[in-house]
Amino acid sequence: MFDNMNRLDIDKIYVLHVKKGYEERLISVKNQFANLDNQITFILDGDIPDLTEFVLNTYFGDGMRMANPATSCAYKHILALQDLVQNNIPYALILEDDFLFRKKFVSVFNETIKEMQQFNTNIKDKLFISYENSNMSYVPKNMLEKNVYLYQHDTTRCAGAYLISRNLAVDILNDIAVNKCTFAIDWYYEYFLKNNKIPVYWCHPPVVEQGSHNGVFVSGIGKNRFGVFRKFVWWVMRFNREYIKPFFRLN
């Protein structure tokens, strides 16, 4: 499954997890890391009961200033960013607990680390890399290059699996302190990165799926269906986007 590789070349890995009611996701996380040497840090604080008036007033605004699953999810991301900043972690991989590694995840991920180390200092300083296929967005065929895994884009492809640099985390936390988080975390990141002209990089091929999207897990936020039918629909959509559409079109 992991191409005989047993370690991700990353300083820190955070997994955002709800303490109760998501035990099957916890089992999935532990199983996927069982053959890896990396230690993972679970972000367990930030569940809905933890969203006090102080927390809501400190970090959130508009429709996000309420105790609901979307705000809880965003708060867990914020807590992960705070931890990596406070502990001076240069780069971290942040995963929501419904992540599912796809084939060759470890080898592709480590290739992206080698590739990003060749970036100039300004890019490495404020870095955001998306590894997932949650919205079925792919790098256009005409842009693909042999042995190249990272491609610049202007959208995030959601926030289920991403690498972030400490300095970018600092900027995000500073923005939230002043302007508050007023969108679901996926859209907040996209808005912040676009507004501050910070490039996003997509990993190609995408090597993470969210189980709440592909039918493996019940979604804790959205209304995605799960089960056999949803798995089939997801497989058809993915096959079309990855193989059929690129064959007939360049994008």
Image (cartoon, rainbow, N blue to C red):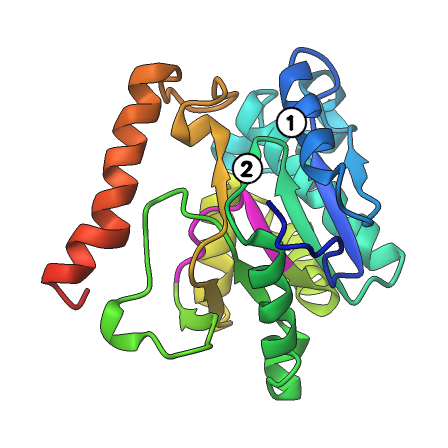
Q: Find residue 241 and report its horizontal and vertical position in percent.
A: 24, 49
Q: Classify the position of the N terminus by image quarter.
A: top right
> Which residue is at a point 12% across and 63% down the rendered structure image?
249
Between 195 and 140, the residue placed more toward the observer is 140
Which residues fall within the magenta stretch?
155-163
**Label 1 belongs to which residue?**
28
Q: Amino acid at mark 2?
A: Leu
Between 107 and 210, the residue placed more toward the observer is 107
Q: Find residue 53 and report its horizontal and vertical position in percent.
A: 72, 24
Q: Amino acid at mark 1?
A: Ser
Position of 44 relative to 111 (above/below):
above
| Residue 183 makes an appearance in the image | no
CA gap between label 1 and label 2 equals 8 Å
Position of 171 relative to 104 (above/below):
below
Dot 2 alpha-carbon crowd within 10 angstroms: few under 14, some 14 to 19, many 20 or more? many
Q: Are marks 1 and 2 in contact (CB under 8 Å)?
A: yes
Q: Quadrant of residue 104?
A: bottom right
Q: Which mark is residue 209?
A: none
> Which residue is at a point 48% across and 63% down the rendered structure image?
203
Q: Classify the position of the C terminus by image quarter.
A: bottom left
**Label 2 belongs to which residue?**
100
> Which residue is at a point 28% across and 52% down the rendered structure image?
242
Magenta region's main secondary structure?
A: loop
> Which residue is at a point 63% across and 43% down the rendered structure image?
95
> Which residue, as the protein is rendered here, is positioned at the far top?
21
Please, what secondary structure does the residue beneath circle 1 have?
A: helix
